[in-house]
Each structure stands twice: as structure tokens, then as C-alpha cells.
Image (cartoon, rainbow, N blue to C red):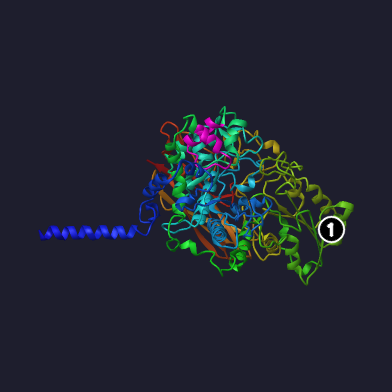
């Protein structure tokens, strides 16, 4: 009897404690000790149908039951709450602005990529939680995991280049930087764009990207796959285009692949206006009611346009049920839980960001220095004949800075507003302070560029594309310019004529190409002794370029796209089968600059390539090591690149594939032993019969070098089952 009483007492005490614990919460879902799915069950039980439909927007807030959801912000290379697009802000808000995404990729530095995203995430939280700013959101539309398969693509600036494996490494790093490393909470949520194969702008609202199952898994979807399975993203945006005839907004792969196979259980949103385009542009459905059914049953749970009429109509006609809506909106609340939106603020470590008295982060030296460091890392030296660079201040009494982009920093459609910016003109003036005079002209009107060049010891010509085409929506007057909604019609540089006349006036001419696209600058490459490339938008653009030009920083950026010599070398724009000559993996023509290309002010020698094994199993990995010695007189970074070639594959494979890289700093005369891990899983192909990645028995040629065409050392290894 005594034991029964004790048992009853224990049960009573446990029940009392549980009651007292839960009593502090008005609703069970507010209890952070409950598992996420139980909390979501309770939320859905409490919501009305109208509230559920409202949660199909980009902000799943339910005011009546005290759920504060959060919306989206743009953030490809810094928080965008300003810039040319202004993103709906009455007063543009500042943020640290880094080089465009493709410029970040040209650093070939995973740690740098993560650092950019960490800084951006902090500023997103600050902006969201500081009372002095409009809130914005904690779901960041970044990174862009699309692949730049063609240099004519108008949004090349947003991607990380043409190689799926390389892009995946950068995508994963950016996601991890945005979301943070806390075991329970995310700093921000990374929403990847635009799934899938969205790399043409002309007719994107009704075009179809067509290719086979292997290219789907091995190329176009691969960065998204890694972003979910390794990066931890639980959100992405469906693309405007169709894939093999079915619009991506309603394509079965949204559920069948990204949810069921990869494990995405969060947000799948439409692109802006894509819902209505299913009827008006794709003509895939006869009306918005059936289109709403298609979206929701495909897994869409957030709409970026006016969807309510379609959803209410779909319910009224019986095309969908309330349970269908319940099923999809669960993903929105999973993301809110990961962001800590449903938990007490004291439990969420990131809730302390942006408190009164904290300095605005974009004004801190830490963030300013990061912008400078990473911008310098992104600079690519394309040519340096006879060691024209670096420049010597003491030899320059007069410098002519010529070109339309020399005195400004151009921001793109997805840029925010930097707290300041430094143009190249300003950067050069700062370097020459006390040494020499700087002349500046924008163009050769009235022969001004020629006259300035004739008066100078050195001419620096600054050319490139305009990031917004300096025109209205879907308009680009200059054929080689491109942007969202407009693909490039040409890839030659119209401003090369300015370079020619300046060079005729002064043979001591250096070209700075500020662009987010490859250009066929054949004449410039043949006739100008030094060419430096950088992408647009960084607030530290001028300082970084001046540091490189005058030798305070040794450039080591590398290209992430093949630069052809002619537009005639490119396949038809809408041919998505990359095996027909696209990217460095299949390109068989003569390039202007190859994938992975970039020079340095010093030289490096490779030796002693070693493998820690003679064979590798299908689930194993191998360590590849090589000695790299700086044989020059200046400290510098080298980007060691590891490529492979399949020698005995049973299926068609690329001619060459990147499978490893590492950026390292080496002092003059010193040797660095560089180790790169090659995973057998990275050697897999997609088996269309098994519908899975397969590592086959094979022989692999391992190639280590400084670019895809500058292979220094090779070795062979067997892959065994």
C-alpha cells in the first residue's frame, strides 16, 4: 500500500510540474520543449482557413495567436534594402556591399565566401531587430545556385560560374555563413534561387530548358542538391522557366526529388508573378483555380504574387482541400522555428543583435576591412607583359585615368546601398598623393581622352558593362550589356575602341576591365601589356584595385567561366545540352582565357605530387599532396587546382572536371605542401537505370595545376568496387 502511495505521489508531482511548466504558455506550440512537428500540429489546429491561406504569402504571421513570422530580403552579395531597385524601401537602408556573386566566386576561397555570408547575416538580423529600421526579414534570397553555362546569360553576375561541383562548394559555404553554426537556431534562413536551369532571360517566362536525366543530377541541380544535403538550406525559389516542357513552378521534381529524396522540408516559393504566368505565359493551365491546385499539390507553400483568388477558387471548386493547404504550410513554420521566431527571445542567441546602443555593423572597421580583403582577393590579373605591373609611384608624375566607370562604383539590381564607396579614380589619387598629378576624362568626346593620354606618363583605361544597362526594365541599348530580363546580344567590348585610341596616344597603357561578364577582348589582349579584371559593386572597389595596381596586394583571383575568343564558338543560347561544347568540360575551341585562369606578380613551381593510396574504394577518399614553391621575389597567393579525367568509364564523361582546389599564401623562396582530399563520391555519375549516383570501377587521371589548361603534374589511380 505504501509503494502504491509513493507511486501516486511521484505521478502527481510529475503531473504538477508539467502543468506548471506549460501554464506559462497560452498555447502548446509556444512551448520550446515540444518537438517541432507537435508544435506545428497545434498551430494548424488553432488556425482558421483564412489564416492558413494568408500563410501562403512570404510572411507566415498569425497575429491572433501571436505568431510573428518573418518575410524575405535579397542578399546575393550583401543585404539589399536599397540600391538601384530600392526593394520597396521608403528610405534606402545601408549595408556592407561586397563584389557581385561571380566576383566572390573568383576569390576561389571558401572561407572568404562564408565570411561574406556571416557578415551579411549579422546585418540582416541587426536590421530586422533594431527599432531604427524597417524590419525586412530573416529569410535571405541567396545564394543563386544556378549555373552560368553561357556568358550571354543576363544574370551571370548572380551565379558562381559554369562548374557545378565548384558552384556547390561555394553554395554550401554561403549557406553555412548565412545560417550560422548554432546547434538549434539559424541566424538567417538561406533561400536558394532559382530551381532549376534558369540561365536565359529572353522569354524566360515561357521557355523550356530541355536536357536529360543525367544532366539534371550531375549538372543543373547539383548545387541545389548539395545546398540542401550538405549546406542545410531548407528553402528555395522555383524558376520561371519550364524543364522538359513542364513549368518549374509546378514540376513534379519539386516534391519527388527535393522533398522526398533530398529532404527539403521548408519553404518552396514561386518567383515573382510566376503563379499567374502559368496561365498567361506558359498557358499550362486554363485558369488560376487549376493553376493554384497545381502549385499547392506540387509543394509550393509561398507565393510571390497575388494568389488568393486562385486558391479560394480552387477550394470552392473542390480542386484542393484545406488539408492540402495544411500539408504545405507546415514547411513555413519549420523555418520559423529554426529562426527562433516561436521561442522566448532569451533562448535565441541572435536576438541580442541590434539592441539599443550597438553601433551599426556596416560602420565598423571589421566589416569595412572584410569588404576590402575580399574585394582584393577577387581581382584577376589577366595579362602582365614585361612586368608592367605593379606600378611604381616614384616614376609617375602624371597619370591619365580614362573611362566611363573610373569615377563611380556601379551597383546592380540586387545590390544594397553601401555606407560609402571608393571609385578607382579616388583609389589612384590616394595612392599618388604627394607623388603625381591625376587627369580624368570619361570618354574621347572632343578628343579629350587622347589629349589626356598624351600628357601622361601612364594611361589607365577603365571599361566594362553597365550593371543595369542604364535603362528601364528589360532594356539594354548596348548589345554586350545584360541584366535580369535581358540576355546579351554580343560579347565583344564596344569600349575597346576607346582603348585603341588611348593606346595610340600613349603606349604605356593599362586596362582595368570592370565587368560581370566575359568579353572577347582579343585586340586588347594582343596589344595592351597589362589587364586587370574585377566585378562590380564592392564598396571597396577603388581601394582594392589601387592596392593591386601599385603592388600593395598581389592578385590571385581566378576566372570561373570560359572566356571564348568569339561568339561564334558558343552553341545556340537555348541548347541546354552542355555536352555539345559548353563550359571548359566540353569546350574544344581556342579560348581567350580558360576556366581557372589568373596570373600573379610572382611565380610558382609545382613538384612532388603524391597520393596516399594507389587505389580508392567506392566509399573512400584519397589525399593528394603537392609541393608548391614561390620562385619569385614577392609574397603571393596561389590557387592549386585538382582536375580529373575518367580513363575507363562505361559511360560518357566530361573531358576534364574540377574536383578540388585550395588557395594558399606563400612567401618568396618558401615551399608549401598542399593537401587536397579527393572523395570517391565526387567521381560518381547518375545511373539512369538505378536512379542514383554510382561510383564505378574505373581508372582516374589526377591532374594538378594552376588552371584547367595549365596542368603541372599528373598521376593515375584505380577506383575499385
What span is in magenta?
Answer: 288-314
Instruction: Pick the residue in front: 718 or 585.
Output: 585
Q: Is residue 490 left or right of residue 234?
A: right
Q: Is residue 20 left or right of residue 668?
A: left
Outermost residue toward the top in this view: 286
| Circle 1 SS class | helix
Residue 537, given in percent of the width and then of the height, sits at 67, 55
Name which quarter of the figure residue 565 lies in.
top right
324 above or below 101? above
Instruction: Pick the residue in front: 526 or 349.
Output: 349
635 above or below 582? below
Name which quarter of the figure residue 330 lies in.
top left
Residue 281 in view in this figure: no
Outermost residue toward the bottom in this view: 434
Residue 126, given in percent of the width and then of the height, sits at 55, 61
Residue 339, given in percent of the width and then of the height, sits at 47, 55
Q: Which residue is mark 1?
A: 453
Amino acid at each position: 500500500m505504501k509503494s502504491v502511495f509513493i507511486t501516486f505521489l511521484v505521478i502527481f508531482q510529475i503531473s504538477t510540474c508539467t502543468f506548471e511548466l506549460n501554464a506559462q504558455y497560452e498555447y502548446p506550440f509556444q512551448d520550446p520543449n515540444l518537438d517541432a512537428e507537435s508544435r506545428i500540429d497545434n498551430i494548424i489546429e488553432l488556425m482558421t482557413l483564412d489564416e492558413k491561406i494568408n500563410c501562403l504569402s512570404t510572411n507566415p504571421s498569425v497575429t491572433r495567436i501571436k505568431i510573428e513570422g518573418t518575410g524575405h530580403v535579397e542578399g546575393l552579395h550583401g543585404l539589399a534594402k536599397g540600391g538601384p531597385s530600392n526593394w520597396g524601401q521608403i528610405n534606402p537602408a545601408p549595408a556592407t556591399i561586397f563584389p557581385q556573386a561571380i566576383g566572390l566566386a573568383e576569390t576561389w576561397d571558401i572561407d572568404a565566401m562564408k565570411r561574406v555570408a556571416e557578415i551579411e547575416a549579422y546585418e540582416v538580423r541587426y536590421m530586422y531587430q533594431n527599432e531604427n529600421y524597417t524590419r525586412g526579414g530573416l529569410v535571405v534570397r541567396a545564394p543563386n545556385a544556378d549555373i552560368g553555362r553561357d556568358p550571354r546569360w543576363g544574370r551571370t553576375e548572380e551565379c558562381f560560374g559554369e562548374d557545378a561541383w565548384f558552384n556547390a562548394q561555394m553554395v554550401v559555404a554561403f549557406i553555412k555563413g548565412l545560417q550560422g553554426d548554432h546547434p538549434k537556431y539559424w541566424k538567417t534562413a538561406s533561400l536558394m534561387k532559382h530551381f532549376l536551369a534558369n540561365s536565359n532571360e529572353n522569354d524566360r517566362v515561357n521557355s523550356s530548358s530541355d536536357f536529360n536525366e543525367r544532366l539534371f543530377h550531375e549538372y543543373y541541380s547539383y548545387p541545389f542538391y548539395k545546398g540542401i544535403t550538405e549546406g542545410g538550406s531548407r528553402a528555395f525559389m522555383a524558376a520561371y522557366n519550364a524543364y522538359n516542357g513542364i513549368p518549374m513552378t509546378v514540376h513534379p521534381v519539386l516534391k519527388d526529388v527535393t522533398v522526398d529524396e533530398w529532404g527539403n522540408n521548408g519553404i518552396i516559393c514561386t518567383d515573382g508573378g510566376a503563379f499567374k504566368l502559368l496561365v498567361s505565359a506558359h498557358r499550362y493551365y486554363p485558369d488560376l483555380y487549376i493553376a493554384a491546385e497545381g502549385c499547392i499539390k506540387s509543394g509550393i507553400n509561398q507565393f510571390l504574387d497575388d494568389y488568393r483568388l486562385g486558391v479560394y477558387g480552387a477550394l470552392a471548386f473542390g480542386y484542393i482541400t484545406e488539408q492540402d493547404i495544411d500539408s504545405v504550410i507546415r514547411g513555413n513554420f519549420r523555418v520559423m522555428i529554426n529562426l527562433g521566431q516561436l521561442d522566448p527571445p532569451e533562448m535565441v542567441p541572435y536576438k541580442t543583435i541590434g539592441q539599443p546602443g550597438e553601433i551599426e555593423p556596416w560602420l565598423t572597421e571589421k566589416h569595412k576591412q572584410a569588404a576590402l580583403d575580399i574585394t582584393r582577393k577577387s581581382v584577376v590579373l589577366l595579362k602582365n607583359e614585361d612586368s608592367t605591373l605593379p606600378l611604381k609611384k616614384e616614376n609617375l608624375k602624371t597619370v591619365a585615368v580614362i573611362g566611363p566607370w573610373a569615377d563611380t562604383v556601379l551597383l546592380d539590381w540586387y545590390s544594397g546601398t553601401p555606407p560609402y564607396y571608393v571609385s578607382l579614380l579616388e583609389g589612384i589619387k590616394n595612392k599618388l598623393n604627394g607623388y603625381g598629378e591625376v587627369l580624368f576624362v570619361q570618354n574621347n568626346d572632343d578628343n579629350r581622352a587622347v589629349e589626356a593620354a598624351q600628357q601622361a606618363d601612364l594611361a589607365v583605361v577603365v571599361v566594362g558593362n553597365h550593371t543595369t544597362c542604364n535603362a528601364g526594365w528589360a532594356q539594354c541599348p548596348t548589345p554586350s550589356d545584360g541584366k535580369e530580363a535581358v540576355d546579351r546580344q554580343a560579347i565583344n567590348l564596344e569600349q575597346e575602341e576607346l582603348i585603341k585610341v588611348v593606346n595610340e596616344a600613349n603606349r604605356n597603357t593599362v586596362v582595368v576591365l570592370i565587368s560581370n561578364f566575359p568579353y572577347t577582348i582579343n585586340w586588347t589582349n594582343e596589344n595592351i601589356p597589362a589587364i586587370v579584371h574585377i566585378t562590380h559593386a564592392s564598396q571597396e572597389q577603388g581601394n582594392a584595385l589601387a592596392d593591386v595596381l601599385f603592388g600593395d596586394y598581389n592578385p590571385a583571383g581566378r576566372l570561373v567561366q570560359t572566356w571564348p575568343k568569339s561568339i561564334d564558338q558558343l552553341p545556340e543560347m537555348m541548347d541546354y545540352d552542355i555536352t555539345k561544347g559548353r563550359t571548359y568540360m566540353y569546350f574544344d575551341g581556342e579560348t581567350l582565357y580558360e576556366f581557372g585562369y589568373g596570373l600573379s606578380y610572382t611565380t610558382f613551381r609545382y613538384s612532388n605530387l603524391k597520393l596516399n593510396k594507389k587505389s580508392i574504394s567506392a566509399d573512400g577518399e584519397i589525399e593528394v599532396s603537392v609541393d608548391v614553391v614561390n620562385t619569385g621575389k614577392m609574397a603571393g597567393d596561389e590557387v592549386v587546382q585538382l582536375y580529373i579525367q575518367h580513363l575507363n568509364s562505361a559511360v560518357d564523361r566530361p573531358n576534364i572536371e574540377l574536383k578540388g582546389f585550395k588557395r594558399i599564401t606563400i612567401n618568396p623562396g618558401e615551399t608549401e605542401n598542399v593537401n587536397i582530399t579527393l572523395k570517391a563520391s565526387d567521381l560518381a555519375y547518375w545511373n539512369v537505370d538505378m536512379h542514383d549516383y554510382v561510383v564505378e570501377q574505373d581508372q582516374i587521371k589526377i591532374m594538378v595545376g594552376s588552371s584547367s589548361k595549365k596542368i603541372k603534374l599528373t598521376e593515375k589511380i584505380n577506383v575499385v568496387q
